[in-house]
Image (spheres, rainbow, N blue to C red):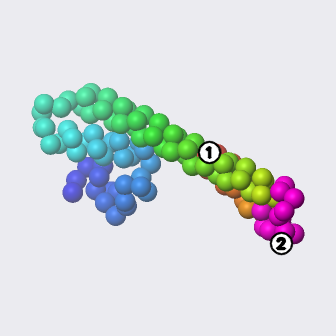
Amino acid sequence: MNGPASEYADQTMGELAPEVLATIVAEQFGDAYGDAVTTSMREDLARRLERAVRDAVVATRKSVADLCRERQALWVATETLPTTSELLHAEARARANEAAYLADAIQSLP
């Protein structure tokens, strides 16, 4: 394997930064069609792919963070129920805090 993909051959697609992944796919596409795909076209394709991957990653992270916030709300509601035992009260508080922490951590990823 030659080109940009060769130096990343031992990594999975999930381990690659969006710009690297986009460049590899654009180069492989260009290689598959030879002279029909110019350098300018490869660069344009790589930019478009990178934007699409980044947008998808951001949307997925937002969705996962929203799920964490829903879980946080569930645990806060459990904690405030008058029928919640003292043991479950402490567990609910801890889980609500953990869900909030995870939501913040996920949203803060680059």
Image coords of residue 84 (percent x, y): 83, 64
The residue under the point 57% across, 49% down is 64
Frontmost residue, 39 versus 49: 49
Q: Which residue is mark 1?
A: 66
Q: Is residue 36 left or right of residue 39?
A: left
Which residue does the image show at 36% across and 36% down from the upper left?
49
Say if 17 sits above or below 51 in the image.
Answer: below
Q: Position of residue 33 (x, y in %)?
A: 13, 38
Q: Residues within 10 Å of mark 1 (few under 14, many from 20)?
A: some
Residue 66 placement, left or right of 16: right
Q: Which residue is mark 2?
A: 87
- Of residues 58 and 95, which is closer to you in this image? 95
In the image, the segment drawn in magenta is 80-92
Residue 56 within the magenta-colored segment of the rendering: no
**Quadrant where the C terminus lies?**
top right
Q: What is the quadrant of residue 87 in the picture? A: bottom right
Q: Nearer the viewer, mark 2 or mark 1?
A: 2
In the rendering, at what x and y percent does residue 36 appear?
Answer: 13, 30
Q: Across the whole image, how many numbered discs are drawn on residues? A: 2
